Amino acid sequence: MISNISIHPKTMFKNALNIQDFSFKSHTSTAIIGTNGAGKSTLINTILGIREDYNFKAQNNNIPYHDNVITQAIGSCL
């Protein structure tokens, strides 16, 4: 389970997106919905490594995840 997700531009220390009470569960499909400008594309593109100008942090059962581990574990349909 991936949880405690935060994203911030590499040039800033403040988070652009901070999700504390959300998780992606293993072996399931998850839809990300929201209004225009809410950060949906930024979230997915950062997780997948497409947006290299952002840093991504997350945890798996309270163990910090690194970018390359998450990128290998997630598939997407954009």
Image (cartoon, rainbow, N blue to C red):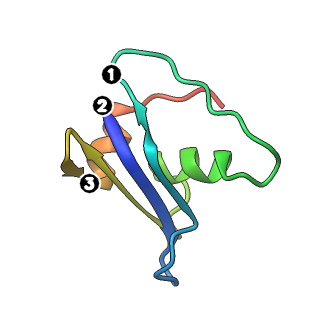
Instruction: Please report the residue visible at 32 percent of the width from the left and 32 percent of the height from the top.
Output: 73
Residue 78 position, x and y percent, is 66, 32
Instruction: Please report the residue visible at 62 percent of the width from the left and 53 percent of the height from the top.
Output: 42
Of all residues, the one furthest to the left in this rendering is 63
- The residue indicated by pointer 1 is 26
Q: Are marks 1 and 2 in contact (CB under 8 Å)?
A: yes
Amino acid type at image mark 1: Ser
Image quadrant containing the N terminus? top left
What is the secondary structure assignment of the residue under circle 2? Answer: loop
- The residue indicated by pointer 2 is 1
How far is mark 3 from mark 2, CA to CA? Answer: 14 Å
Amino acid type at image mark 3: His
Q: Earlier in the sequence, mark 3 or mark 1?
A: 1
Of all residues, the one furthest to the front in this rendering is 21
Q: Quadrant of residue 26?
A: top left
Q: Are marks 3 and 2 in contact (CB under 8 Å)?
A: no
Instruction: Please report the residue visible at 56 percent of the width from the left and 49 percent of the height from the top.
Output: 43
User: Measured along the vertical axis of the image, is residue 11 above or below residue 59?
Assistant: below
- The residue indicated by pointer 3 is 66
How far is mark 3 from mark 1, CA to CA? Answer: 17 Å
Amino acid type at image mark 2: Met
- How packed mark 2 is, by other alpha carbons closer than 10 Å (few <14, some 14-19, many 20 or more), is few
> Is residue 62 shown left or right of residue 67?
left
What is the secondary structure assignment of the residue under circle 3? Answer: loop
